[in-house]
Image (spheres, helix red, strand yellow):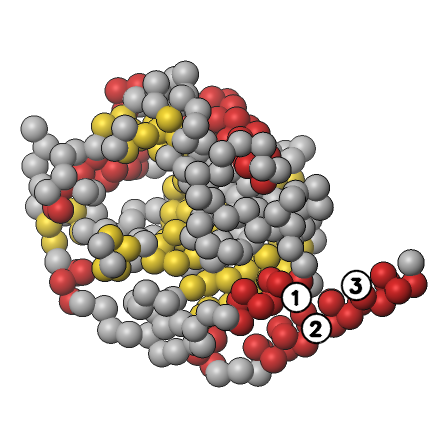
Amino acid sequence: MVVIGHVVKSLRGIARRFLLQNKVASLHNHRKVFTNLYRKMSYTTIERGSQNTLGYRIFYTDENGPISPFHDIPLFADKENKIYNMIVEVPRWTNAKMEIATKEPLNPIKQDTKKGVLRYVHNCFPHHGYIWNYGALPQTWEDPNHTDESTGCKGDNDPIDVCEIGFRVAKRGDVVQVKILGVMALIDEGETDWKLIAIDINDPLAEELNDIEDVEKHMPGFLRATHEWFRIYKMPAGNPENKFAFNGEPKNREFAEKIIEETHQYWQKLIKNETDASGIDCSTVTIDDSPNKINVINALTILQQTEDPGSPQDMDPIVDKWHFVQLK
């Protein structure tokens, strides 16, 4: 037992030294620390590679070393009060289509690509970029092996998406505590792609917004704009408008939390290798009963094998172009 204790302390010491080295590294490392007040956990992001390049990644660490934001950050910040942790992939008003890299070790945030080219969402007038802080709930998974009884479609093989509608423009990689207000059911290329509507619990409107009908009361037109955004955002690329289940109507908080619980159960099977992983990398540092658990040394090695931090590259000015689309 003494030997094991020394090994654990040694691993933690290595991780802390690694984090300290990063603190004094180049200024463009852009380290950010977020504190989860409910569980007294702090998460730090470490940027690797250069923004607007294929090699750019955002990794997460806790007090012991690198972790997976997908698998190691808890779903709940406060389970009793149904407060959830949200991983912010895309800040409001931005265009870069960032996402949790579900098929890479430690699941860093990266920019999505199509045919080897970085993806940016189009500005479909009058919407500029994303109109909410956009991200995902950790420890959830829309199972592509399961046909949802509500939509008749299988899951999209990703964590469940969140549109956070508060006033603050979040930063890429933030871990935000949110409460759920409702959900929309986008059908994307024949797959169920749930879109949760949520608000930062620290937002001035948070006490007023407790269910989906409160959104229209206090933010008239916002749900309609959200529905329109998802319908049209792929049209400038020549794609047809997206479709929704439930005639595009959002479902209430109770329904949304039922969907979250289902996707959390699918994730629990995923992390324990009890279902077809469909290419998902399930490396975890904190889930002790997972056969995919890795130690801190392995996690550090994964991070250190990525590109060194570099200066952001210029973005093509065409990203700022307005696109005008017309629904039939």
Q: Amino acid at mark 2?
A: Ile
Above or below — where is 279 with respect to 174?
above
Image location of residue 160, percent across then percent down = 44, 37
Considering only order in the chain, which callout, 2 or 1, is on the residue closer to the N terminus?
A: 2
The answer to whether one can see residue 138 in this image is yes
| Residue corresponding to mark 2 | 14
CA gap between label 2 and label 3 equals: 10 Å
CA gap between label 3 and label 1 equals: 11 Å
The kind of secondary structure element at disc 1 is helix
The answer to whether one can see residue 73 in this image is no
Q: Name the quadrant of the N terminus.
A: bottom right
| Residue corresponding to mark 1 | 297
CA gap between label 1 and label 2 equals: 8 Å
Q: Residue at x 61, y 80 (%)?
A: 21
| Residue corresponding to mark 3 | 8
Q: Residue at x 45, y 76 (%)?
A: 308
Q: Quadrant of residue 184?
A: top left
Out of 254 and 191, give the one closest to the viewer: 191
The kind of secondary structure element at disc 3 is helix
Residue at the far right: name it: 2
Image location of residue 158, percent across then percent down = 42, 40
Q: Quadrant of residue 192?
A: top left
Considering only order in the chain, which callout, 1 or 3, is on the residue closer to the N terminus?
A: 3
Out of 181 and 73, give the one closest to the viewer: 73
Out of 265 and 326, give the one closest to the viewer: 265
Q: Amino acid at mark 1?
A: Ile
Asked whether disc 2 touches disc 3, contact meaning CB atoms under 8 Å apart, the reply is no
